[in-house]
Image (cartoon, rainbow, N blue to C red):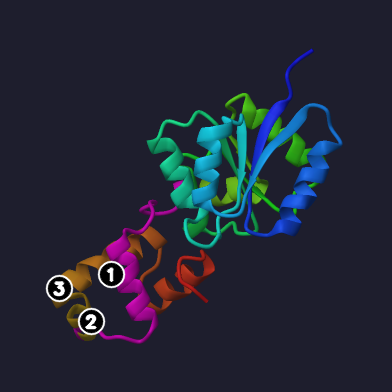
Amino acid sequence: MTAPVRLLLADDHPVVRDGLAGLFARDPEFEVVGEAGDGAEAVRLAEELRPDVILMDLRMPGTDGIAAIAELARRGVAARVLVLTTYDTDSHVLPAIEAGATGYLLKDAPREELLRAVRAAARGEAVLAPSVAARLMSLVRAPGAGPLSRRELEVLELVAAGSTNRETAARLFITEATVKTHLLNIYAKLGVNDRAAAVAEAFNRGLLPI
């Protein structure tokens, strides 16, 4: 008989953890070995319990899911991380995958899809929710595809707040020429031609807080 997939659940909502634990308890293929309420606890328990798969929420107090994924990779923890969240925006998907997540699912996934995803993650296979896969494909195909840098996001946030190039330069301690260069790079990456369109597209992709 094959050993069950050992799971660690990381979510700051106890009701969510209870629901997931109950779901997996009904199937002998899985064993929930631990639960964590934040990213730091997830890292500690992962090192202690050595699960096969960690179901990781992204938005948690203190150490969030992305930081926890990166820390697990830095420490060489072998567990596969399957993100389970309600967010599928670029600002969540790309950092999670870049940090080392094996898969990315949404919390509205049907039970069977979740079970299949955990099995696949335990085998080391990449698992993506359909909407996440479509988003990544659109990014790859987009003109000047590529995530915005931290500085480009800072420029865009100030532009969205109504700052002029001169005001943005003063706030970020850079020259107006540098601001203009950042804006041109932003336009190319987002496939737009002006400030208003860049802000609208950034909101559409979830790059700016609503």
Q: Secondary structure at mark 3?
A: loop
Q: Which mark is residue 174?
A: 3
Q: Secondary structure at mark 1?
A: helix
Point out residue 72 in the picture as x, y percentages from the top left corner.
45, 39
Residue at 67% x, 30% y: name it: 6
Residue at 76% x, 30% y: name it: 30
Q: Which mark is residue 171?
A: none
Q: Is residue 179 above or below residue 186?
A: below
Q: CA distance from mark 3 to mark 2?
A: 10 Å
Residue 115 lies in magenta, yes or no?
Answer: no
Q: Is residue 179 above or below residue 92?
A: below
Q: Is residue 94 left or right of residue 3?
A: left
Residue at 35% x, 87% y: name it: 162
Who comes first in sequence, dot 3 or dot 2? 2
Q: Answer whether labels 3 and 2 touch (C-beta < 8 Å).
A: no
Q: Which residue is mark 2?
A: 165
Q: Nearer the viewer, mark 1 or mark 3?
A: 3
The type of residue carrying mark 1 is Leu
- Tell which of 176 and 116 is nearer to you: 116
What stretch of residues is rendered in magenta? 140-166
Point out residue 142 in the picture as x, y percentages from the top left corner.
44, 53
Q: Is residue 195 above or below residue 82?
A: below
Who comes first in sequence, dot 1 or dot 3? 3
Q: CA distance from mark 1 to mark 2?
A: 9 Å
Instruction: Rate crowding at label 2 as few (under 14), some (14 to 19) or many (20 or more) other CA atoms within 10 Å.
Output: some
Point out residue 1 in the picture as x, y percentages from the top left corner.
79, 12
Q: Answer whether labels 1 and 2 touch (C-beta < 8 Å).
A: yes
Asked whether residue 25 appears in the rendered view, the answer is yes
The type of residue carrying mark 3 is Ile
Who comes first in sequence, dot 1 or dot 2? 2
The type of residue carrying mark 2 is Asn
Q: Quadrant of residue 150?
A: bottom left
